[in-house]
Image (cartoon, grey):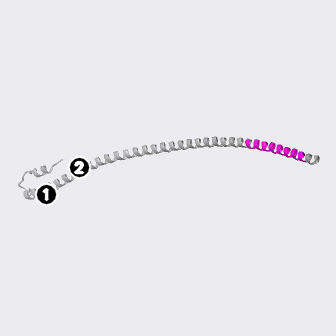
Amino acid sequence: MITPLDIENKKFSRKMVNGYDVEEVDDFLDELTSDYEKKCRDISEKDKKIAQLEKDLVHYKTIESTLQNTLVIAQSAADEVKNTAKQQAEQIIKEAEGNAKMSLDSLNQTIILRQKEKDEMEKQFDIYKAKMESLLISQLELIKDMKKDD
């Protein structure tokens, strides 16, 4: 690649016949050197900017990859938490159903026991009532017999 310094130091051989005007060639070369230097600086700056942008791109791609992995992990964790919660809920429901069934069975047994006690008390009351009736009848008979004897 030709550098601005190469352009500036370029010397042309002089010809006497139909040669170029030396000053005009030097002025043109000076102008060309100045423009070429600007272009070289621009290209150098753009190369640096491209390198920085490529570096930034790699950095952002790394961040993107990390974020994607984080999202996948978060989704997995959320699914796991959801499944665990569902299992716990099912277990709680089963335990509650079991406890309810045991309570129901216990209540049914208590009801049956109370019903038997009630039936037994009714029998005892009937027996007591029959005894009282018998006693009253016998007392009434005694009173009638006493009136007859008088």
Q: Provide residue 65's location: percent of width, then percent of height.
A: 37, 45
Q: List the residue tagged with mark 2.
A: 48
Quick one: SS at disc 1? helix
Q: Provide residue 1's location: percent of width, then percent of height.
A: 18, 47
Q: Which picture quadrant has residue 66?
A: top left
- Does the magenta run of residues contain 32? no
| N-term-proximal mark, 1 vs 2 | 1
Q: Provide residue 46's location: percent of width, then percent of height.
A: 23, 52
Q: Nearer the viewer, residue 4 or 87?
A: 87
- Magenta residues, start to end: 117-143
Quick one: SS at disc 2? helix
Binning the other alpha carbons within 10 Å of mark 1 as few (below 14), some (14 to 19) or many (20 upward) gives few
Residue drawn at x 87%, y 44% is 138
Q: Nearer the viewer, residue 74 or 123?
A: 123
1 and 2 marks in contact (CB < 8 Å) = no
Cα–Cα span, label 1 and label 2:
26 Å
Q: Is residue 59 left or right of residue 95?
A: left
Give the amino acid type for the residue marked by disc 1 in the picture.
Glu
Most extreme residue toward the front is 150
Q: List the residue tagged with mark 1.
A: 31
Residue drawn at x 91%, y 46% is 146
